[in-house]
Amino acid sequence: MNRAPNKKETDLLSGDLFSGAGGLSIGFHTAGFTPVFFNDIDLDSANTFHANFPAATPFVGPIQELSASIIRERTRLGAATLDVMIGGPPCQGFSINAPIRSQEDPRNHLFHHYVRLVLEGLRPNFVVMENVPGLVSLDGGKSLESVLAAFEKAGYSVKFKILNAAHYGVPQERWRLVFLGTCLPGVEPSFPLPTHYSLQRPNFTGGRDYTFEHAIGGAKQISFLYENLMKPATIGEAIGDLPSIPSGGGAGEMPYWKPARNCYQEMLREGASGIFNHECAGVAPINIQRISHVKPGGSWRDIPHKLLPKGLQRARRSDHTKRYGRLDPEGLSGTILTKCDPHWGTFFHYAQDRIISIREAARLQSFPDWFRFTGSKVEQYRQVGNAVPPLLARALAEHIKTLIKENQPKRTVKPYKERAYATSQGK
């Protein structure tokens, strides 16, 4: 029923490591990059990626077993130049939400295999790697220094920035650390400036130093925000056109029930004739009772004391601010997690007594409606929560295209099929 919008084949080629379901690749695809290959150890995520980008060659398994020569031999890339390699190594070891944050966590060293594939022979013109902001402060900054040193040793000029997805049109407050580097001479890596305003302040180490906070923050600059940046889509604007469904209900595929009402809905509907994955997990009857007392934008504080879980009955009013929260249709979403569990955050629909559906979570992440998640409900929620918002990825991709155009105005290259053929013929 739905499919990725048809695009003319371009000469811009991308590869995706630690791809997950493909959030980064969607953004680069919509900006004109062709995904040639992807790698992930998780079969469910890889199945979702391949279902949406069937022409991309899958490498499912540990990245430790992957080599540049294997990639070139088994994909359409051949001897052609890879324009950008994107990816996000697992972030559990870096995350401030992890119970133990240590440089010794083996997951914190998987990025070395990203760099290894660069050195072995892929040599993309640009590299983009994303992770959680917690990497900046891990072990006093040693992990951050290790990443920068590895890329610089590989011959790349690299910069990093902590970006808020809301600043690029995503209706969600989600901060990500992004490394952007290039090996092209005369090209200075940089980041796309915000296009949308958000009044949320960063609450992590490096919030002032490594974000665009200086350009968009502060009470004195409110007038600047309204005059120079766009208003982001709200939760209601992002998901308000989707059909009503009961708790635990919905369907894997259904038609639209009303026309798009705003630009955000129109954008995500492009290439789609209906809706995938608009189904939600059920919740216990006691939680339905609890949420019936919570107003839009409210939380556990609205629930009668006798209905609260025992732990929250002992909590101070200033604690657990987002638990058992109901979304505010006029605001932005908090970070979409791998589990839309009301005990851990604000995941109840603003007008229906249920948690948000997989598609609603995907809309808040800026996934287009043509993109279909596969696997169980649990796996689909996890894939959505682990992804980089496609609109953030698209902003990065468009910026890289600008860097290429501005610094190499006379760059002329053949489409990848012609390049690979010419090389094989010794031309």
Image (cartoon, rainbow, N blue to C red):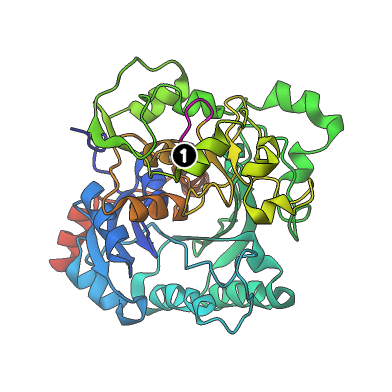
Q: In this rendering, does residue 77 appear at all?
A: no
What kind of residue is marked 1? Ile
Viewer-proximal residue among 420 and 343: 343
Q: Is residue 207 left or right of residue 61?
A: right
Residue 237 in the image: state x and y as whole percent: 50, 23
Q: Tell me: residue 359, above or below residue 410.
A: above
Q: Tell me: residue 214, above or below residue 129.
A: above
Q: Quadrant of the C terminus?
A: bottom left
Viewer-proximal residue among 396 and 343: 343
Figure quadrant of residue 81: bottom left
Q: Which residues are magenta?
A: 350-355
Figure quadrant of residue 75: bottom left
Residue 169 in the image: state x and y as whole percent: 55, 34
Q: Which residue is mark 1?
A: 355
Name the residue rendered at 46%, 51% in the picture.
385
Outermost residue to the front: 306
Label 1: which secondary element: loop
Mark 1 neighbour density, 10 Å: few (under 14) some (14–19) many (20 or more): many
Residue 72 in the image: state x and y as whole percent: 24, 70
Q: Tell me: residue 311, above or below residue 219.
A: below
The chief SS type of the magenta part is loop
Count of labels shown? 1
Q: Is residue 119 left or right of residue 2?
A: right
